[in-house]
């Protein structure tokens, strides 16, 4: 893997708006995590463009410093490298994201972190986009951060043989993937490669099928799914806006999510808008086809 340099870390901290992170501390960790979820989006734009980035943490650090984002393997991978460079004790864990709130699989399509600092062990995840705003104590319980979260110790499974072991589950309401399970055992970035290859290149990967961008702020969650821009406030209020033109779409990418488009050519921007629009129209057609038929007019 590529080496993370001191200059890389300085540029990363500049992206986060953190001039002086100080010595490792619980307060410092919370501040870094808040800055990360506010400023660095979960996004799959490069996958949509057919040029998926690798997950070497040093390259992810440079990617974020340059104004880009990524998904969990990039975001949590880079954040772990940043924290280690600042002197924090970090452990990586393989996990699994689920639409089924009762699932216990931790198959490896997510990377989660735990951090030991100040005599405490904390669950840290800046790689969801719609996850916690701050770290959570790694102990079972309910936690309120504008949205409600719950951590549970769980016997999780993985692999075709149904093997498994000790782990944890993060439960959330009101999001497409309300459950994330992760293994208690430590993992290495190399363990993420099989899932990364599928998520970034397979035609049936959700990241290949739809553009997704997410950003967690103190006031709520911004989500861009294709051409639908959705804001869910911490008080439960929800606003939905359909982006109708390429300029409006690209403006949302940069202004709402803070993802620079400096690395995207004019031709690529046009191709992205075309791809997103075709997927949007297919979604519209599917929604119309599945809608109940209108009741027939009464006779006479």
Image (tube, helix red, strand yellow):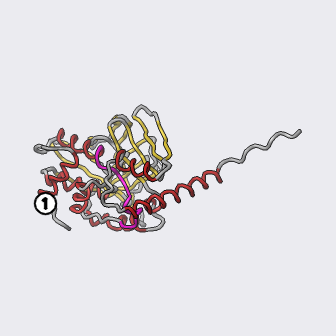
Identify the residue shown where x is 38% and y is 56%.
Answer: 96
User: Mark 1 packing: few (<14 Cα in 10 Å), some, or many (20+)?
Assistant: few
Quadrant (top left/top right/bottom left/bottom right) for the N terminus: bottom left
In the picture, measured across the screen, residue 53 lies left or right of residue 249, that is left
In the picture, measured across the screen, residue 263 lies left or right of residue 47, that is left
Instruction: Let me know if residue 48 is in the magenta part.
Output: yes
> What secondary structure is marked by label 1?
loop
* Residue 11 x/y as whole percent: 17, 53
Quadrant (top left/top right/bottom left/bottom right) for the C terminus: top right
Can I make out residue 163 in this image? no
How many numbered discs?
Answer: 1
Q: Which residue is mark 1?
A: 5
Residue placed most toward the observer, 79 or 26: 79
Identify the residue shown where x is 23% and y is 53%.
Answer: 79
* Residue 159 x/y as whole percent: 39, 65
Indicate whether 264 appears above or below 291.
Answer: below
Indicate whether 5 appears above or below 138.
Answer: below
Indicate whether 134 appears above or below 278.
Answer: above
* Residue 241 x/y as whole percent: 49, 42
Residue placed most toward the observer, 15 or 138: 15
Residue placed most toward the observer, 40 or 22: 40
Can I make out residue 235 in this image? yes
Residue 196 image-quadrant placement: bottom left
Start and end of the magenta stretch?
38-51
């Amino acid at each position: 893997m590529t080496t993370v340099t001191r200059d890389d870390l300085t540029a990363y901290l500049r992206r986060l708006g953190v001039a002086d992170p100080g010595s490792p501390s619980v307060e410092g960790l919370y501040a870094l995590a808040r800055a990360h979820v506010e400023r660095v989006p979960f996004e799959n734009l490069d996958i949509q463009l057919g040029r998926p980035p690798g997950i070497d943490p040093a390259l992810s650090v440079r990617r974020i410093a340059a104004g880009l984002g990524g998904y969990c393997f990039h975001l949590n991978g880079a954040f772990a490298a940043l924290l280690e460079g600042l002197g924090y004790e970090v452990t990586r864990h393989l996990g699994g994201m689920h639409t089924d709130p009762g699932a216990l699989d931790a198959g490896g399509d997510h990377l989660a972190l735990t951090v030991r600092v100040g005599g405490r062990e904390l669950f840290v995840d800046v790689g969801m986009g719609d996850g916690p705003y701050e770290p959570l104590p790694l102990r079972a319980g309910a936690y309120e951060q504008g949205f409600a979260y719950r951590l549970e110790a769980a016997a999780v499974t993985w692999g075709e043989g149904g093997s498994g072991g000790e782990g944890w589950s993060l439960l959330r309401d009101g999001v497409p993937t309300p459950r994330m399970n992760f293994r208690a055992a430590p993992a290495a970035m190399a363990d993420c490669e099989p899932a990364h290859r599928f998520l970034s290149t397979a035609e049936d990967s959700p990241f290949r099928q739809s553009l997704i961008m997410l950003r967690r702020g103190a006031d709520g969650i911004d989500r861009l799914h294709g051409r639908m821009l959705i804001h869910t406030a911490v008080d439960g209020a929800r606003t939905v806006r359909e982006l109708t033109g390429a300029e409006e779409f690209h403006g949302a990418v940069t202004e709402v999510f803070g993802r620079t488009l400096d690395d995207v050519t004019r031709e690529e921007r046009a191709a992205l808008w075309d791809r997103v629009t075709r997927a949007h129209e297919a979604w519209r057609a599917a929604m119309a086809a599945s809608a109940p038929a209108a009741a027939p007019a009464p006779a006479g």
